[in-house]
Image: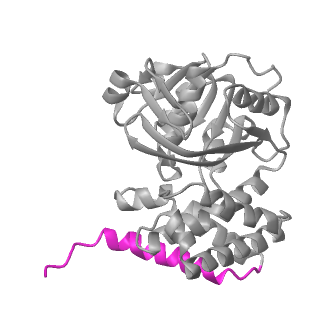
Amino acid sequence: MSTPFPAKPRIAIIGTGALGCYYGALLVKAGLDVHFLVRSGRAAVMARGIRIKLPTERIHVRKVQVYGSAAEIGPCDLVIVAIKATANAELKNLLPPLLGPETMVLTLQNGLGVEEPVANIAGAHRVLGAICYIGCTRTAPGVVHCSFPGLMTIGKFGKPASERTQALAALWRRVGVKCTALDNLEAQRWHKLVWNVPFNGLAIIAGGLTTDLLLADEGLRTLARRLMEEIVEAAAKFGHDIPRSFVDLQFERTAKMGAYRPSSLIDFEEGREVELEEIWGEPVRRAKAVGVSVARLEMLYWLIKRMLAARKLPKRKK
């Protein structure tokens, strides 16, 4: 890709969960041409638009361009993948109609190995990943509560940040997102796991606890730190240095989020698929492949896997 990234790109957003709605609303508010591919709750979004509740303001985007298929949208300059990684099998049908010669594809998904499925369909040269340090929850179709707007880092899949990557970061900053383009996307992914692994995982196995309750429990808070330390050790084996100050920062940020329900907990409690392999399984496999013991992480992985399996078993009669 050699042409400059457009100042006013045509944008498609696949999925209108918390992140798709939040970032999409900011783009629309800034006057950009945004097209939402909505899989569920389409009528509600068409009728009422998107509403975002932030700590200091309310955003209501009344007119939203909503579609039921990618073919209706057509090729775009930027495609934002905002569906869960558990639904990546659908991308083989969703992505191709949205791709033009210069299309960039940005995935907002969590975990390790999430760029590869996108690259297999769209081509690695198009793919970027975003790491979203944010606390937001979709409470109804098109309705999002954001307790911690946070920040975003982006990177190009398998390569240093290009001029177009930097231009995309500048676009995000223009619409109000604190965004930085960094050269090592994989390192960014390991950094995000420092939060995702303990807080998403412990919220599930501890019986549905919000982050404030996890922090208030001395044992769970200590376990969260130990899990973070295992991630840091594994990341170091791949050449990604994560300082202790970054670990401390996760606790500071989480304390500001209040009674936050991590996204994996919401998915678990509502009976949806959980990003088990991307957030817990793949880090375990990669750590063990380079000889790093991640006993606590591995235990957490198997406990969550068992709890997910138990959801599918028929309930015993009393």
Is 154 one of the magenta-colored residues? no
Residue 140 picture location, percent across and down:
36, 40
Horizontal relation, residue 34 to residue 207: left or right: right
Chain part drawn in magenta: 291-318
The residue at 63%/79% (across/down) is: 222
The residue at 68%/38% (across/down) is: 123
Magenta region, main secondary structure? helix
Tell me if residue 251 comes above or below residue 133 in the rendering.
below
Quadrant in the picture for residue 57: top right
Tell me if residue 304 comes above or below residue 260 in the rendering.
below
Is residue 168 in view?
yes
Residue 108 picture location, percent across and down:
61, 44
- Nearest the viewer among 250 and 217 is 217
The residue at 73%/17% (across/down) is: 7
- Nearest the viewer among 192 and 293 is 192
Is residue 273 in view?
no
Tell me if residue 302 comes above or below residue 160 in the rendering.
below
